[in-house]
Amino acid sequence: MAGNKLTVKQKKFIEFYLATGNATEAAIKAGYSDNHVTLVREPNIAYNDDEGIEKLFNKFCEDHKGDNIEHTLVITMEGEVYHCIGQPVNISLPGTKLQGAKVIHNHPDDGNIYGDCFSLADFSAFFKYKIKRLEVISGLGHYSIEYNGLPLPEGQLLKTI
């Protein structure tokens, strides 16, 4: 988004989201398809505001448990909040801002099989970007991991898992 200008589709998404409070419904009404990933800025939050982040993550769980589109909420060390929507979401969209970030995302269910826990892509991004905290919600529950060590090269990660 050059110059922080929103596209028509992004403006529609925000308009529908404000009206419904449901990001999945808003994304569909705004014209996003399952194979499109978008990045939307949300209001900033203090990175060390653990209580505020917990409330934000709890609301995320309420809003997106059972959704059929993947959502990811990224809180950077600068307190910037990004909401990624798509199928599937590549959590590396915010790039280097992921370092030290706090991230929550959902794994959609396909109707027959519950979404899983952490995927190999989750672990890979977690270690590669030194994500501070990674959470996932799915039909199996709500899971969280934190890591304070050094980043692991992908080759070593695959051997570790």
Image: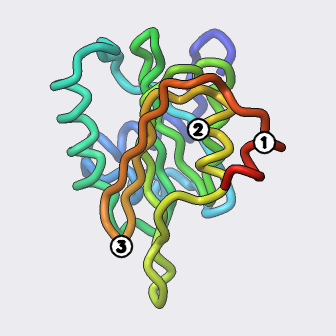
Q: Which residue is mark 1?
A: 156
Q: Which residue is mark 3?
A: 139
Q: Earlier in the sequence, mark 2 or mark 3?
A: 2
Residue furthest right in the image: 155
Q: Nearer the viewer, mark 1 or mark 3?
A: 1
Residue 101: x, y in percent? 48, 24
Q: Give the secondary structure at mark 1.
A: helix
Residue 73 can be seen in this image = no
Q: Amino acid at mark 2?
A: Phe
Q: Quadrant of the C terminus?
A: bottom right
- Between residue 149 and residue 103, name the one nearer to us: 149
Q: Amino acid at mark 3?
A: Gly
Q: Which residue is mark 2?
A: 126
Q: Is residue 71 above or below residue 73?
A: below
Q: Residue at horizontal 65%, vertical 21%?
A: 1
Query: Would you call the spot at circle 2 few (<14 residues within 10 Å), some (14-19), or many (20 or more)?
Result: many
- Between residue 39 and residue 157, name the one nearer to us: 157
Distance between the alpha carbons at the discs numbered 1 and 3: 30 Å
Location of residue 51 (image quadrant): top left
- Between residue 57 and residue 31, name the one nearer to us: 57
Q: Amino acid at mark 1?
A: Gln
Left or right: 107 in relation to 42: right
Q: Earlier in the sequence, mark 1 or mark 3?
A: 3
Q: Nearer the viewer, mark 2 or mark 1?
A: 1
Distance between the alpha carbons at the discs numbered 2 and 1: 13 Å
